[in-house]
Image: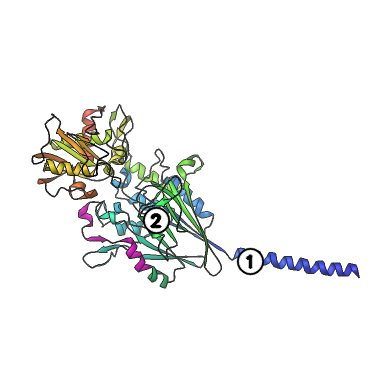
């Protein structure tokens, strides 16, 4: 009797445990994980170089990550996809669209550099790459409606969960691309616009909303995140933010919401893992940054991408690998660190080609260093990826001073680079009043009411980076590409050994 009682009791205990375990397993199984992978500011970085792992390995890394959750992964870009390398520039972005198609990118934000070649190619890029551009805050001034070549939002369904993406461009696009290419567009306040669109996207059935943006963000050593993109996390209805534009590695939470930015040039990819319950209620989110450049030896080549890249490389190799000359010294440049040897050398070339007294160019127009050794045409395309031209004028001393002042210690756009005028400034003085003295190359003081011959680039002349040349006299676009002038200068010299002249120095 005791034995029967014990067995009966044991049976019910075991049954209860089975039911509890089964309930736990079913509850766990009913949870759904949706993963969003993103890159940003790819800038046509197709070839492996330095920290750039290259398209072949980047595509494989994304495919490997997608394979972990093939039914629940979405791949997107934060914009600035095309402009930046010789291979991409010479073919107007065609190879990048091939990369995006192979990678499986579904959506992209609109970066400021998507406008560098006008808007005619935007629709073709999306078609060839198999993705859609999304943006709500670029309005056509001629219709007062959102632009027709980008969807304001998109909803992608995975495992029954509807993920809404609202696209956002940076308002800085108005002055961070050639003004003629954006004159018909208004870049509205992202905060105002996203608040208008959240109810519409919710009404369309989205379970959560992600802001897919080309808005900047930064993260300090303590993990605190700031910037334009961070402000979106404070808005009710936004569940996560994908950032770009500032070329930063960012992964963390703002107001309890994930925000990521995947550095630049395909060196990293970002990942947000969202977990939902069986009713599509969001349970948790986890942001992660995978720095591919730090584990390059673990990456493999994607077979398909290797063939695609190989085709373009063979086609472009005669141009890219042409050796123009060599430099005996490193021509370094970081637009946020101050005047550089590369900046001075570039301005010297501009000044010489235009036959003027003073040259100035924006630090952001020079994109990479030139290491000592051979200089190829491909390297100069990387240094100067933009098709900017020499713009000459006569400019008063007061306007020369004002424009150089604008490019001193400017955390937004970086430092101006100059040649032909010796400028001494006080870094501790108030912005706009830092310059102590200015003198021409021969030592003649620059008079505020005097006029001098100056060359800049067409981007700056038309208001790029908020430089102001409205008072210039005899403004003339020479239509000579600055890159061509650089190539010509290197070929003529054969070997260059630039020495820093310190045109712009602190007292």
Let me know if residue 185 appears in the view: yes
Which numbered dot is residue 230?
2
Q: Is residue 22 left or right of residue 395?
A: right
Q: Position of residue 36 (x, y in %)?
A: 46, 57
Q: Position of residue 307 (x, y in %)?
A: 42, 46
Query: What crowding class fits label 2: few (fewer than 14 Cα within 10 Å), some (14-19), or many (20 or more)?
Result: many
The residue where tag 1 is placed is: 26
Q: Is residue 275 left or right of residue 373?
A: right
The reply to whether discs 1 and 2 touch (Cβ–Cβ < 8 Å) is no
Rendered residue at 15%/30% (across/down): 441
- State the residue in front, 318 or 235: 235
- State the residue in front, 125 or 273: 273
**Does the segment drawn in magenta span residue 188?**
yes
- The residue most toward the front is 429
Q: Is residue 453 left or right of residue 273?
A: left
Rendered residue at 52%/54% (across/down): 67
Indicate the colouring scheme. rainbow
Image: magenta residue range: 177-197
Q: Is residue 29 left or right of residue 286?
A: right
- State the residue in front, 188 or 370: 188
Q: CA distance from mark 1 to mark 2?
A: 37 Å
Looking at the figure, which quarter contains the N terminus? bottom right
Which one is earlier in the sequence, the residue at label 1 or at label 2? Answer: 1
Looking at the figure, which quarter contains the C terminus? top left
- State the residue in front, 305 or 74: 74
**Does the segment drawn in magenta span residue 25?**
no
């Amino acid at each position: 009797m005791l034995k029967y009682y014990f067995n009966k009791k044991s049976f019910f205990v075991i049954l209860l445990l089975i039911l509890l375990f089964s309930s736990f397993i079913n509850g766990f199984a009913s949870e759904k994980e949706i993963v969003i992978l993103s890159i940003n500011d790819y800038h046509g970085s197709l070839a492996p170089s330095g920290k750039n792992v290259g398209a072949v390995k980047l595509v494989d890394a994304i495919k490997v990550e997608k394979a972990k959750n093939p039914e629940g992964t979405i791949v997107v870009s934060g914009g600035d996809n095309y402009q930046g390398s010789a291979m991409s520039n010479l073919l107007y972005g065609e190879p990048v669209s091939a990369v995006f198609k192979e990678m499986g990118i579904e959506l992209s934000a609109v970066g400021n550099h998507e406008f560098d070649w006008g808007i005619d190619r935007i629709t073709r890029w999306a078609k060839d790459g198999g993705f859609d551009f999304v943006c709500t805050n670029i309005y056509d001034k001629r219709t007062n409606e959102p632009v027709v070549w980008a969807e304001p939002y998109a909803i992608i369904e995975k495992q029954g969960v509807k993920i809404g993406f609202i696209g956002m461009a940076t308002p800085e696009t108005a002055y961070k691309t050639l003004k003629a290419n954006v004159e018909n567009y208004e870049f509205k306040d992202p905060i105002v616009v996203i608040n208008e669109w959240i109810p519409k996207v919710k009404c369309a059935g989205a379970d959560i909303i992600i802001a897919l943006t080309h808005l900047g963000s930064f993260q300090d050593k303590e993990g605190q995140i700031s910037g334009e993109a961070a402000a979106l996390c404070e808005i009710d209805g936004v569940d996560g933010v994908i950032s770009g534009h500032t070329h930063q590695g960012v992964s963390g939470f703002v107001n309890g919401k994930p925000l990521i930015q995947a550095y630049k040039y395909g060196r990293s990819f970002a990942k947000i893992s969202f977990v939902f319950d069986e009713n599509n209620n969001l349970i948790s989110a986890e942001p992660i940054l995978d720095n591919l450049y730090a584990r390059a030896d673990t990456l493999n080549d994607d077979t398909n991408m290797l063939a695609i890249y190989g085709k373009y490389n063979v086609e472009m190799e005669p141009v890219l690998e042409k050796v123009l000359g060599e430099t005996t010294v490193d021509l370094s440049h970081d637009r946020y660190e101050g005047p550089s040897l590369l900046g001075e050398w570039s301005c010297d070339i501009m000044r010489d080609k235009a036959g003027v007294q003073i040259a100035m160019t924006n630090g952001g127009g020079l994109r990479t260093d030139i290491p000592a050794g051979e200089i190829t045409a491909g390297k100069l395309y990387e240094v100067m990826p933009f098709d900017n031209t020499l713009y000459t004028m006569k400019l008063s001393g007061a306007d020369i001073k004002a424009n150089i002042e604008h490019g001193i210690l400017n955390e937004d756009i970086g430092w101006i680079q100059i040649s032909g005028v010796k400028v001494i400034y006080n870094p501790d003085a108030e912005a706009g009043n830092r310059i102590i003295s200015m003198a021409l190359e021969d030592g003649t003081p620059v008079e505020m009411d005097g006029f001098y011959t100056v060359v800049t680039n067409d981007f700056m002349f038309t208001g790029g980076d908020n430089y102001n040349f409205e008072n210039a006299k005899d403004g003339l676009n020479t239509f000579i590409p600055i890159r061509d002038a650089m190539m010509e200068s290197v070929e003529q010299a054969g070997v260059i050994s630039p020495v820093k002249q310190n045109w712009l120095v602190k007292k």
